[in-house]
């Protein structure tokens, strides 16, 4: 059976092939961080909220925050089971692991407030519904690009005045690039037989609004396929050269197992 590839795999490999090898193939210990729980919990809460709205039985903001709290606690507890000594957790600036857990829990709640406020002030945004009736909320895809299978999930697909827009939620400081959104646009077209969306955006939890619209027209099927063909070939050929850089290695969760890590 052919192994599936994903946008996260491609991003991880391009950032540092050797880090990809340690994390995904050798499966060495990965340094935990509270920001991972914040991101996971926000995505779960946003998904449950929007799905409830589409179903006509919308959750209240307080109910949504309970979903977030449960997911946050579950993710933190799972990381604590693996790494109970908080001294080994990532710091976030001046905040050590234990302090950052409390801090980021509140940051996620604040981002849900902004999410709800954005929805309330933009009623013109409607969740896209696929031809088969599937709502565009955490919608999965599984496509074949010239023999390379690519799998993933799209946080949201929105229909508004600009047409169909693919959207990804970001709880960190910076958005992603247009490639990730381009893959999502192509996946919608491939899986649902629609015209490939030309616009994508990131909804930023920090600011409470989307980024500028990304033009995705350059990400044709051929262009996306080529990127995944190269990734698949490199992984199968076991090309995992290290790319150490001090700033990059400082936030690498497998740096403690890497002999090439830059200090």
Image: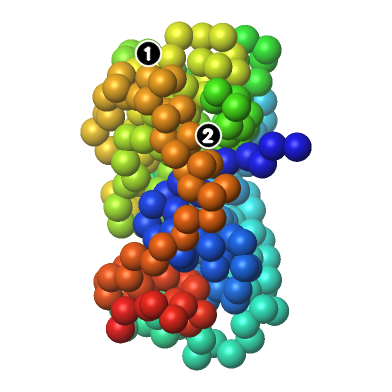
Give residue 154's mark. Answer: 2
Question: How is colour applied across the structure in the image?
Answer: rainbow
Asked which quadrant contains residue 211, the reply is: top left
Q: Is residue 133 above or below residue 16?
A: above
**Residue 75 at x, y = what percent?**
63, 65
Q: Secondary structure at mark 2?
A: strand
For marks 1 and 2 on the same chain, the one whose residue lies earlier in the sequence: 2
**Residue 21 at x, y = what percent?**
53, 63
Residue under label 1, please give it.
163
Q: Is residue 25 above or below residue 196?
A: below
Observer able to see residue 188:
yes
Q: Nearer the viewer, residue 241 or 153?
A: 241
Q: Quadrant of the C terminus?
A: bottom left
Observer able to see residue 110:
no
**Residue 168 at x, y = what percent?**
43, 38
Q: Is residue 251 above or below residue 176?
A: below
Q: Nearer the viewer, residue 166 or 1?
A: 1
Q: Quadrant of the N terminus?
A: top right
Q: Secondary structure at mark 1?
A: strand
Residue under the image location 50 percent in, 90 percent down: 87
Q: Residues within 10 Å of mark 2 (few under 14, many from 20)?
A: many
Q: Is residue 144 left or right of residue 111?
A: right
**Residue 9 at x, y = what percent?**
51, 49
């Amino acid at each position: 059976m052919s192994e599936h590839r994903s946008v996260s795999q491609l991003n991880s490999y391009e950032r540092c092939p050797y880090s990809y090898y340690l994390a995904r193939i050798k499966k060495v210990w990965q340094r935990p961080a509270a920001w991972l729980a914040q991101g996971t919990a926000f995505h779960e809460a946003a998904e449950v909220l929007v799905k409830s709205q589409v179903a006509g039985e919308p959750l209240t903001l307080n109910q949504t925050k309970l979903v977030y709290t449960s997911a946050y606690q579950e993710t933190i507890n799972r990381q604590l089971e693996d790494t109970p000594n908080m001294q080994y957790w990532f710091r976030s600036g001046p905040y050590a692991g234990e302090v950052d857990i409390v801090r980021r829990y509140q940051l996620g709640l604040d981002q849900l407030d902004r999410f709800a406020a954005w929805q309330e002030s933009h009623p013109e945004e409607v969740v896209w519904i696929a031809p088969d009736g599937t709502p565009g909320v955490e919608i999965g895809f599984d496509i074949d690009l010239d023999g390379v299978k690519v799998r993933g999930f799209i946080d949201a697909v929105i229909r508004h005045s600009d047409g169909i827009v693919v959207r990804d939620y970001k709880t960190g400081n910076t958005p992603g690039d247009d490639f990730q959104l381009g893959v999502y646009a192509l996946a919608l077209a491939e899986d649902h037989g629609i015209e490939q969306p030309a616009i994508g955006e990131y909804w930023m939890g920090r600011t409470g609004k989307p980024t500028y619209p990304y033009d995705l027209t350059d990400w044709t099927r051929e262009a996306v396929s080529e990127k995944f063909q190269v990734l698949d070939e490199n992984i199968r050929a076991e090309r995992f050269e290290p790319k150490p850089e001090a700033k990059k290695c400082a936030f690498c969760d497998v740096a403690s197992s890497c002999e090439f890590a830059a200090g």
